[in-house]
Amino acid sequence: MDTVILSDWLAARLDRGAAEPVYRQTLRLMQQAILTGQLPPGTKLPSSRTLAQDLGIARNTVLHVYDQLTAEGYVISTTGSGTYVADTRPDTAAMNTRRKPAVVAVAAADSHGQSATRIPQPPKRDLGDLSTRGRRLIGQAGVSAKQWGAFMPGVPDVAEFPARTWSRLQARLWKEANPDLLTYAPGGGYRPLRRALSDYLRVARSVNCTPDQIIITTGIHQSIDLAVRLLTDVGDRAWVEEPCYWGVRSVLQSSGVTLVPVPVDDEGLNPREQDLQQPPRLALVTPSHQYPLGMVMSLARRRTLLEYARQHNVWIIEDDYDSEFRYGSRPLASLQGLDDAGQVIYVGSLGKMLFPGLRMGYMIAPEHLVDTFRTGLAELYREGQLMQQAVMTEFIMDGHLTSHVRRMRALYGERRQILIDAITARFGSELPVMGDEAGLHLVLGLPDHANDRAVTVAASEAGVIVRPLASYYTTDPPPRRGLLLGYACVPNDRIGPAFETLARVIEQTALKTPTRAA
Amino acid sequence: MDTVILSDWLAARLDRGAAEPVYRQTLRLMQQAILTGQLPPGTKLPSSRTLAQDLGIARNTVLHVYDQLTAEGYVISTTGSGTYVADTRPDTAAMNTRRKPAVVAVAAADSHGQSATRIPQPPKRDLGDLSTRGRRLIGQAGVSAKQWGAFMPGVPDVAEFPARTWSRLQARLWKEANPDLLTYAPGGGYRPLRRALSDYLRVARSVNCTPDQIIITTGIHQSIDLAVRLLTDVGDRAWVEEPCYWGVRSVLQSSGVTLVPVPVDDEGLNPREQDLQQPPRLALVTPSHQYPLGMVMSLARRRTLLEYARQHNVWIIEDDYDSEFRYGSRPLASLQGLDDAGQVIYVGSLGKMLFPGLRMGYMIAPEHLVDTFRTGLAELYREGQLMQQAVMTEFIMDGHLTSHVRRMRALYGERRQILIDAITARFGSELPVMGDEAGLHLVLGLPDHANDRAVTVAASEAGVIVRPLASYYTTDPPPRRGLLLGYACVPNDRIGPAFETLARVIEQTALKTPTRAA
């Protein structure tokens, strides 16, 4: 492209009616011409005066374009002798090791000013481009695009959150806007919040800790991730309950930990002989309310697990899932409160109590690891959100947390009962209900021959969200079939009709006797 | 302990003046007696009436305690025949594989009601309990306990943040409190924010993307972590610049990636022959402003890197660090904008522009990986914070982001000049200044014989925060010595005095000619 053609080529492309200023258009077009090789290295550019005249634009504009092209390394300006296109072509000599055939053709513009560039199509990439762990993560992803509605499990009713109260506290704190609360939070979180939480957890969960031991995180996922990265190496074994929360599996696996699914029975985690013979590095348990089946780990099992962990140097992560929402007796004391060897890391969430979007949780580190966990969290995540933590502190100190949880426990208790009544009315005792003593969901058992994944798909087509129990097991086919039904986020009067729809789907897809060979 | 002794033992320990209610004290003491074996399995408890009389408390209180002990599995109640201590001792038979000598002695109380329990001290745990990667993470942690003051690098002046404006927008949104914004955020973030950001980045950074390609994260750390877990496997090689940001090294290493430090020169990343011969899986670069040295990657290098990546299937993560704060010419266009093979993942942060505690950043995924990245983020982190994202959207749309960045650029530019003037006045050209064209810090070069880590410690004792250049290198001793000085968060009138203090430290610890052998 000689200089005459450059002017023509630019003139044909500049759009004076466009929102993009002429300066930007000219710059962009010239960059494009250089990158595609239409203006090859060494080409002398017309003087700014000439180009401005040819294009009918201000000379200043062209000067700015040339300046910017120089600054960005597209062209080289030599005082006196003009402006030349720089050689910015990829240094192929630097790449000729293990080289595949070159795919870039530096193309010349034809004399009509049309680009003859044929940049080959980039190779199509697909899931095959992910790493092995990336493919596994995506392949088994349990996360749902919907976060609301009958019967989404694990979601509180955010419409019931006292947003006005929260907003008032928030406005008061932002009025002062203490700069110390706008920086990173390297010390494990806002100290008054850690004090308030340790008071709360001591009473509510028989947890035994000082405020220093509490570390504020963005939730269960981050807490577990941090513990795993600090306490395990790639290839280390971790016990997880079978079944368990899919998110836990994803977090552990993506850090290179080998999962060992351990069965649960009515007393909770029940390791087999072969499990015991190979002590893991880490055991992840939900003793107060097994997720998703709901059984409570017995005191004898708790003490056995703690003793085994002490003898074999096993770290225990205690996920105290949904323990705030119990509809019967008080929960058992936490494992953490029974631990006197400093081997239990207790993790909990505030989002389920208030609203999930809050992204706030906590972990309780053993005393000798507090500094390590704080440093690790800051190093891996550079935490912040102290303002939000300060709002949360006021919310707790003013009693709003306790009263909100109390109100929600009553409300969710009602909804749970409406759902159980609907199940009983429809199916009698044909389908068992499990795990309904606590939490935000229950499990509706299905016959062994039923395909709970297929029921889930059919239910979704009928407008009802459920989760198949199968997706919480690692074994395939899973030992039990069932559906997780979240009732907490469903308005009372929607529960009956939505369950009616689901019941029809269940009858059509799960209760038919399996076809026998004719 | 027979029942008479139980009453005595409890009576001696109950404190009627304590804040803890008598019910809780009694419950706690009895749990303790059972756990320590002072009340051995099979012991029959006194009737509630007897114990209440002995202790002089309400019978109802004792009944509640017994109920709770039953619910928690400490005791077993048999109708008619009374209440017995359950056997909750650890099931040592279940643990006798690879067993060490038992360390728990089930102790009996002596007849004075005093505990004879001698629970052995738990084994002391130290850093040796961390995993190898955990020890490395903590051992090389670069995070600082202080987040503010002269000359903390990488921190904006949060006191200048327009908190009132933010608070006003926030109050308006919370007044409506749309429940959809209180749930998890599985779709990559608040869509209007992604649209606003794609518009902003197209203009400001020559980025080429649709709103769909933008994924909101909590910042650079999370963005890189996600990409690494999806695109690399344990043991994969990743190029990092030498020197580079310590946080990046920590994130990569803790995911099991092997770091390959690649030198930089005045044109940015400059791989050696041996680097090129072993293509990595991933390359992490800071082309617009090398961190921490500040050089700009030349256009030729950019194109070479892209071409090499295309030929050898290398993923590129482009960290566009601090590019909003440039004090000279416009930055070069982003690598992302030059990429037509879908191999560049662009990551950026909003915290440095506004306030770090915000914890908000973004990544731009190649189009064919958008769904994968969204799913991966939701699966690993269960993101939320849509309310805050909505506030940010309003902040951008109303023009506050642009005007705040413009104002800060002017302010930081002043501070940078004050610091440079102070350096020149004191040291002339004896100590070089590097990387001052952009960002929130500059690098003050020290002589090769100086120990920049020692200077940092001495400066800290004198009340001035700096970071040694050595901590950004993986090689030891590092090829260059220097100090990172952050000026952005230091009020104008504090810069001179703080630098005076630092200069004295430098003269005493770094400018003395190294001692020669006598």
Image: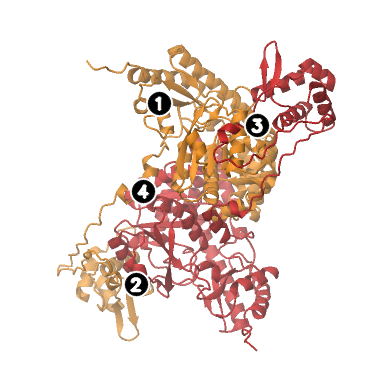
Chain colours: A red, B orange
- Looking at the image, do the residues carrying marks 3 and 1 touch, with CB atoms under 8 Å apart? no
Disc 2: which chain? A
Say which mark, if any, is on residue B464.
1
Residue at the spot of label 2:
A273
Disc 1: which chain? B
Q: Is residue B229 left or right of residue A122?
A: left
Same-subunit check for callouts 4 and 3: yes
Q: Amino acid at mark 4?
A: Thr
Nearer the observer, B434 or A6: A6
Upstream in the sequence, badge 1 or badge 4? 4
Disc 4: which chain? B
Give the percent coordinates (x, y) of residue B178. Answer: 66, 53
Q: CA distance from mark 1 to mark 4?
A: 33 Å
Q: Is residue B410 left or right of residue A7?
A: left
Residue at the spot of label 4:
B132
Q: CA distance from mark 4 to mark 2?
A: 29 Å
Q: Is residue B44 left or right of residue B110?
A: right
Say which mark, if any, is on residue B333.
3
